[in-house]
């Protein structure tokens, strides 16, 4: 370990030699550590399963014969308040995870399609947040002065803002258009300063480090400085921050959908399903349990995995 | 002529508050034992509600829930009967001695007041008070039902008693006699007088919105305290003389409303029935609670019936594709009402609609013009040359029950290749938007409750082609059919009210041949009463609310 870290640092100090080899070594090391961590493996496995379910949602629908919006009034008891027929929320060979009360829509199809919405929004928001965070954080840290002043004040402003209230206000006042896109933009709009602050701080220290000074003295362009000297050194922080951000965004998306400002029906999403299941908790607990447990396990898995990645990275840097 | 609040769903106030009714299918009112038994005198009836009344001033408020409440504190010349089923839609004299004497081809109506009728301040309810109360309807700050302005002959520049003074067309030859001069012959004037903005008030009172906070009562109760949005307490009005009033039993000593409760909380409290909740009544339960009230104990204190409102899908006949009657008929055949009924909470909370008018209407005809058939729908679309489908926009409210129905409609039309885009409009501006032809889209999900059980308050407002206005338009389908218009005029000219109502039943069928709307369901009420509640039945005139003038406690000493 020590050797690997040392090599990597040397490599970074000298941009002309060995740089491409270093990250592979670090990446292999982290992967190796994670593979020996049972919690990390289990979490990764569950996430892989969920992603697979999301990707295969149309296939699941085709196999079971139930689309995510198809009604099935034969699966509910219309004379008894529209409760699913059978025990455990209508779980049967026909509907593997049961059905929704009032309309008999297949829960398996809905959670699978709901996972697509949740993951897509969380992934897109993470990408956009990272992009904004890195660009603005590095601008502020690299140039300093008035650029730093402006970016930092904007970040302070956004971080001090009651983000959730503002998100609800924005999303409910905007016209219905493309809800998923709106969610991504709004979530990222309020999310990037948290990453940008870390990036700015690290960039501030990095620009004054010897290897950067050396590169600058040897006539490297600003572009080369940014992309070859500073950015590679931010990699581990970025990996940790983004892995930990994904579950947060899944939760935010679910929360906003729960509050009725997320994706609009009939598009399923987990938060929306949990929201509509609340009034049924006493008579049809499975309706609440299915999306609730999936959301809980997904967020838990992503958090555990993010945490283990950070631990592995920190261990590497400390050594 | 009012929009249904029922469709805003099981949780909407007006309805929730006092929604229920009887006499329709599934009425479970039993004499003795249950909430239907005779009430004892005394005690306080508690009412649990999600939201406050729209207005305490009868010149402003006008929906099934608040009209029911007004009867406790106000009296009019006429009112609806107190009783289940058809009794509740029968118009009877209240302050007046009879239903009025028409003359001059039913253009002039004369009413005489009973003796001994007083306001809560002790002032007599005389002809001047009746005249003044009705004149308030012309005040620019008033809202309420359109009937005073629609029927009574008034100068175009008349702006109510506060600004313009006396209205010449309401005469008061003596303290006990009122004579109305109408714009045109109106044989059913006694029914119109049941509307809340015909309530008498002492001359000169109630300027601005004074009655919204401190009403002057003429009925058996008066307002003791009122905290807007939180609580309302009624106590006995000592000036009310029982001998002048055949309608109001007024058994309890008071009423206590609690507003602003969550729908689910109300259901839990009603099921548990602890403490004063045993003396409580409320509106319709949530769909999720239906399965929990199937035990004999809870069934015994449940009232069910129709609200008298129809939830429907309007089709804008001026839009591309929908201007073809075959396309509209195809949609009529294709909408699967099983799914819309299920979306509203199943057969206990909604009944499949076929005709436009619900079964509570007098003279209604029962028929099913478009039984569900995808084959017929496809065939009609093919005849219209649209077998490959097209797109439509459906205006709806982002309220759970509304969205559920909208999605059910969307799903129903999918097999025809008709792609429905749901356009959510905020609840507060929904009616304003869809009532503006320039802003409404292809279809809208809405409903209608009649003012009294006659087709006159259901079909002409919704389907008279000459009533299409650029704002506040109720003819959402924008149907302008010469045959329908002629028939509306012909029925309006009929002197026999019962014959007119039967003719409206036939008109209903004539309109449905044009397929301007898809009647989706007749809203039902399922309400759980407290175990100590007696004298409760659902009134067909108040959107199926528990008739407040008759409800009381079994044991007032508890």
Image: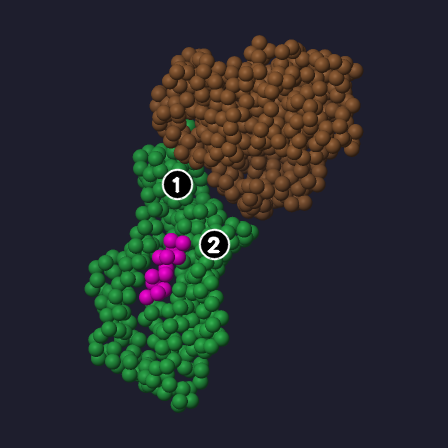
Chain colours: A green, B brown
Q: CA distance from mark 2 to mark 1?
A: 23 Å
Q: Does A250 appear in magenta?
A: yes
Disc 1: which residue: A277
Q: Is residue A17 left or right of residue B203?
A: left
Disc 2: which residue: A167
Query: Residue A290's spot in the image, x, y percent?
Result: 33, 45
Q: Which quadrant is home to the C terminus of chain B? A: top left
Q: Residue at x 40, y 37 (%)?
A: A279
Question: CB atoms at circles 2 and 1 under 8 Å apart?
Answer: no
Q: Residue at x 74, y 32 (%)?
A: B163
Q: Is residue B501 left or right of residue A243?
A: right
Query: Residue B221's spot in the image, x, y percent?
Result: 54, 20
Residue A67, located in which quarter of the rendered image? top left
Please name whichever residue, A136 or A76, is drawn nearer the observer in this view of the structure: A136
Density class for disc 1 (Cα within 10 Å; few <14, some 14-19, many ≥20) is many
Query: Residue A198's spot in the image, x, y percent?
Result: 37, 69
Please name whichever residue, B557 or A108, is drawn nearer the observer in this view of the structure: B557
Magenta region, residue range: A240-252
Is tag 2's residue or tag 1's residue first in the polypeptide sequence? 2
Q: Which quadrant is home to the N terminus of chain B? A: top right
Residue A299, located in which quarter of the rendered image? bottom left
Badge 1 marks a residue whose secondary structure is: helix
> Looking at the picture, do discs 2 and 1 lie on one chain?
yes
In the displayed structure, would residue B23 be above or below residue A163? Answer: above
Residue B172 in sight in this render? yes
Density class for disc 2 (Cα within 10 Å; few <14, some 14-19, many ≥20) is some
In the displayed structure, would residue B322 be above or below residue B361? Answer: below
Q: Residue at x 47, y 25 (%)?
A: B256
């Amino acid at each position: 370990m020590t050797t690997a870290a040392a090599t990597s640092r040397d490599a970074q100090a000298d941009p002309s030699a060995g740089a491409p080899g270093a990250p592979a070594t670090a990446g292999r090391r982290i992967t190796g550590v994670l593979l020996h961590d049972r919690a990390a493996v289990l979490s990764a496995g569950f996430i892989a399963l969920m992603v697979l379910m999301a990707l295969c949602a149309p296939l699941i629908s085709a196999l079971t014969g139930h689309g995510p919006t198809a009604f099935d009034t034969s699966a509910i008891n219309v004379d008894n308040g529209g409760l699913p027929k059978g025990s455990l929320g209508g779980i049967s060979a026909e509907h593997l995870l049961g059905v929704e009360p009032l309309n008999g829509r297949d829960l398996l199809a809905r959670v699978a399609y709901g996972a697509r919405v949740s993951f897509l929004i969380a992934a897109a928001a993470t990408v956009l947040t990272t992009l904004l965070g890195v660009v603005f954080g590095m601008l502020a840290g690299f140039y300093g002065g008035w650029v730093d002043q402006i970016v930092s004040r904007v970040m302070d402003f956004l971080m001090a803002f009651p983000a959730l209230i503002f998100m609800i206000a924005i999303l409910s006042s905007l016209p219905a258009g493309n809800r998923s896109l709106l969610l991504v933009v709004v979530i990222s709009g309020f999310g990037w300063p948290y990453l940008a602050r870390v990036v700015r701080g690290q960039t501030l220290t990095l620009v004054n480090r010897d290897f950067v000074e050396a590169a600058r003295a040897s006539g490297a362009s600003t572009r080369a400085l940014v992309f070859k000297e500073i950015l590679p050194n931010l990699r581990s922080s970025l990996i940790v921050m983004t892995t930990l951000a994904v579950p947060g965004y899944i939760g935010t998306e679910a929360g906003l959908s729960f509050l009725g400002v997320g994706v609009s029906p009939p598009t399923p999403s987990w938060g929306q399903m949990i929201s509509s299941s609340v009034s049924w908790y006493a008579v049809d607990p499975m309706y609440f349990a299915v999306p609730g447990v999936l959301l809980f396990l997904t967020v838990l898995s992503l958090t555990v995995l993010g945490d283990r990645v950070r631990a592995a990275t920190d261990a590497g840097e400390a050594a | 002529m009012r929009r249904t609040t029922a469709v805003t769903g099981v949780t909407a106030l007006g309805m929730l508050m006092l929604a229920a009714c009887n006499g329709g299918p599934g009425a479970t009112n039993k004499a003795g034992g249950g909430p239907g038994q005779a009430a004892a005198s005394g005690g306080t009836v508690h009412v649990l509600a999600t939201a406050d009344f729209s207005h305490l001033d009868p010149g402003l408020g006008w929906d099934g829930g608040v009209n029911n409440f007004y009867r406790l504190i106000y009296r009019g010349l006429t009112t609806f009967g107190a009783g289940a089923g058809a009794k509740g839609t029968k118009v009877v004299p209240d302050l007046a001695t009879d239903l009025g004497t028409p003359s001059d081809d039913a253009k002039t109506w004369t009413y005489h007041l009973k003796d001994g009728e007083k306001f809560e301040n002790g002032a007599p309810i005389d002809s001047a008070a009746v005249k003044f109360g009705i004149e308030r309807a012309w005040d620019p700050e008033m809202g309420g039902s359109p009937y005073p302005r629609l029927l009574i002959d008034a100068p175009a520049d008349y702006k109510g008693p506060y600004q313009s003074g006396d209205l010449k067309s309401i005469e008061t030859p003596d303290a006990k006699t009122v004579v109305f001069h109408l714009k045109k012959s109106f044989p059913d004037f006694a029914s119109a007088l049941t509307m809340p903005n015909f309530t008498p008030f002492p001359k000169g009172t109630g300027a601005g919105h004074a009655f919204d906070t401190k009403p002057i009562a003429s009925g058996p109760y008066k307002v003791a305290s009122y905290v807007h949005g939180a609580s309302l307490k009624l106590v006995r009005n000592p000036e009310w003389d029982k001998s002048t009033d055949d309608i109001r039993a007024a058994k309890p000593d008071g009423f206590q409303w609690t507003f602003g409760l969550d729908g689910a909380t109300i259901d839990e409290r009603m099921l548990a029935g602890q403490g004063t909740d045993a003396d409580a009544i409320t509106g319709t339960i949530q769909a999720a609670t239906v399965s929990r009230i199937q035990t004999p104990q809870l069934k015994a204190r449940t009232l069910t019936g129709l609200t008298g409102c129809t939830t429907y899908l309007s089709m804008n006949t001026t839009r591309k594709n929908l201007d073809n009657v075959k396309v509209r008929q195809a949609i009529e055949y294709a909408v699967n009402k099983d799914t819309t009924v299920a979306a509203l909470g199943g057969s206990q909370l909604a009944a499949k609609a076929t005709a436009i008018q619900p079964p509570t209407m007098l003279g209604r005809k029962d028929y099913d013009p478009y039984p569900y058939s995808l084959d017929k729908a496809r065939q009609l679309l093919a005849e219209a040359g649209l077998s490959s489908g097209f797109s439509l926009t459906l205006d709806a409210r982002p309220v759970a029950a509304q969205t559920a129905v909208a999605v059910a409609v969307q799903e129903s039309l999918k097999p025809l290749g008709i792609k429905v885009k749901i356009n959510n409009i905020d609840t507060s501006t929904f009616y304003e938007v869809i009532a503006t032809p320039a802003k409404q889209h292809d279809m809208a999900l809405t409903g209608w409750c009649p003012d009294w059980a006659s087709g006159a308050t259901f079909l002409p407002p919704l389907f008279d082609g000459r009533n299409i206005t650029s704002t506040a338009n109720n003819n959402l389908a924008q149907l302008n059919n010469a045959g329908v218009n002629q028939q509306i005029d012909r029925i309006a000219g009929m002197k026999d009210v019962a014959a007119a109502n039967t003719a409206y039943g036939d008109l209903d069928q004539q309109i449905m041949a044009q397929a301007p709307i898809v009647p989706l369901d007749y809203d039902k009420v399922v309400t759980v009463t407290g175990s100590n509640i007696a004298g409760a039945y659902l009134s067909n005139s108040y959107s199926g609310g528990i008739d407040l003038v008759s409800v009381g406690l079994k044991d007032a000493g508890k």
